[in-house]
Image: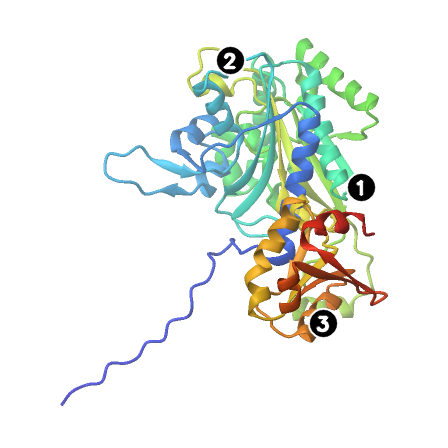
Amino acid sequence: MSQKKENIKLDPPRAPKGMRDIVAKEYYYYQGFFEKAAEVATYYGFKPIETPLMEETRLYTSGIGTDTDIVQKEMYEIKTGSGSIPLALRPEFTAGIVRAYIENGMQTMPQPVMLYSYGQCYRHEKPQKGRLRELRQFDLEILGSEKSIADATVIKVAMTTLEEAGHNNLQLSINSIGDKACRNGYRKELTNYYKKHLAAVCKDCKIRVKNNPLRLLDCKDEKCKPIKEGAPQSVGFLCDPCKQHFKEVLEYLEALKIEYTIDGNLVRGLDYYTRTVFEINAKAMPTEKKTDTETEKNNEESPKTEEPILLALAGGGRYDYLAKTLGFKKDLPGIGVGIGVDRVISTEGFNQELAPRILKKPKIFFIQLGFSAKLQSLAIIEILRKARIPVMQSLSKDSLSSQLGTAEKMKIPFTIIMGQKEVIDGTVIVRNMDTRSQEEIKVEKLTEYVKKIK
């Protein structure tokens, strides 16, 4: 007796958790932001660079630090063939750009070298609003200058970019974590403080006390928050050169009329930072959806006014010792910032009218009637493209009414109509969609005529 095989129905494939498709209008938001950010960066003297999406794993373990959350918990390592050098997907830009600086001999170029880059990074963390496992960043780096004006330049360009993207309610938090001359004293004081509170901190911080004390201040666990708030602050342990550098950075910010808050607990999440560290936050109202249980509980209590929360849009700092950890013969001073583009776009305040240059609002809709006109359609569109005249069309449609209807829905002010008669005569009809007036124009005069119409 034959047994029938069960038909196993598989669900269609889906995008991996924490990753998503970007389509339709949202795609243009990303493209528009990148063009604006690149434009601002270019005016300040930054040049573009593109580094590989995959790098040798040791670039990140050496550069970022083995005791950071990124390396320990979040980095995507790639399986390669036997004997191959281990690779990892890029979790951040700076280490790769410093590697590119060294490998491409940029130390022979006029210093400092100012670079910008844009693309995806990957971190295996819990997905949250504006921060997924596949995230997009716009990155700025200044390499080869220890001057405080380089720090101020990076902050100014990042702030200007965010403001021109529509975010006007920004808050800059800044700190100095010192250098190798003064940080050991602070690290020792911080360790002694946390040892007194060891029983009250999370399990990760119990390990950080021994292995990497500065990471204690980067802990996001609510359990550790009150202890962190009482911790000694790095600015109280700065040596004279670090004090002077930080003082100058703040003076530049004041001269630029950039308001700031000194956050003594700010260290950022990477081991390569030294001296200046900063974050740029946007004030926003909470938008997380409550569960039914939470809603019922809230209804029983007296109504409360929700306080604004701070969402980090950008962050960065100085990394004067990173190059040497990557094998460079000497220290290479550097300062950079990464802007989280997903959060910039998803946070209230983003200017959705920041359309990319490719998305110019068309003033012409091309309509064709009959096969002869269809044959000429792409040639007419190419004439308009070469003249940089934005045009829309629906070449798959045949009837005049359906094509006119599409033009009306899109609120395009003029249509160009070509039928069999126009093909024979070498003309087109240009119709004003508001007045319904129309004029017959020779094809060779079309671009000249269209450029004149308002």
Badge 3 density bin: few <14, some 14–19, many ≥20, Cα 10 Å: few
Q: Which of marks 2 and 1 is in front?
A: 2
Q: Distance between the residues labelled 1 and 3?
A: 39 Å
Q: Pointer 3: what residue? A: 405
Amino acid bearing label 2: Gln
Instruction: Verify CB contact (< 8 Å) between mark 2 and mark 3.
Output: no
Q: In which quarter of the image is the N terminus?
A: bottom left
80 relative position to 425: left or right: left
Taking depth in this image into account, of 385 and 417 the one nearest to the observer is 417
Of marks 2 and 1, which one's residue comes earlier in the chain? 2
Identity of the residue drawn at 38% across and 32% down: 56
146 relative position to 15: left or right: right
Q: Nearer the viewer, mark 2 or mark 3?
A: 3
In terms of image quadrants, where is residue 427?
bottom right
Q: How far apart are marks 2 and 3 (CA)?
A: 60 Å
Amino acid bearing label 3: Gly
Badge 2 density bin: few <14, some 14–19, many ≥20, Cα 10 Å: some
Q: Pointer 1: what residue? A: 168
Question: What element does badge 3 sit on?
Answer: helix
Q: Distance between the residues labelled 2 and 1?
A: 37 Å
* Residue sticking out furthest to the right: 435
Taking depth in this image into account, of 26 and 193 the one nearest to the observer is 26
Instruction: Verify CB contact (< 8 Å) between mark 2 and mark 1.
Output: no
* Residue sticking out furthest to the left: 1
Relative to 165, residue 15 above or below = below
Q: Pointer 2: what residue? A: 107
Residue 293 percent across, percent down from the top left: 66, 69
Q: Is residue 78 visible?
A: yes
Question: What element does badge 2 sit on?
Answer: helix
Identity of the residue drawn at 67% across and 10% down: 241
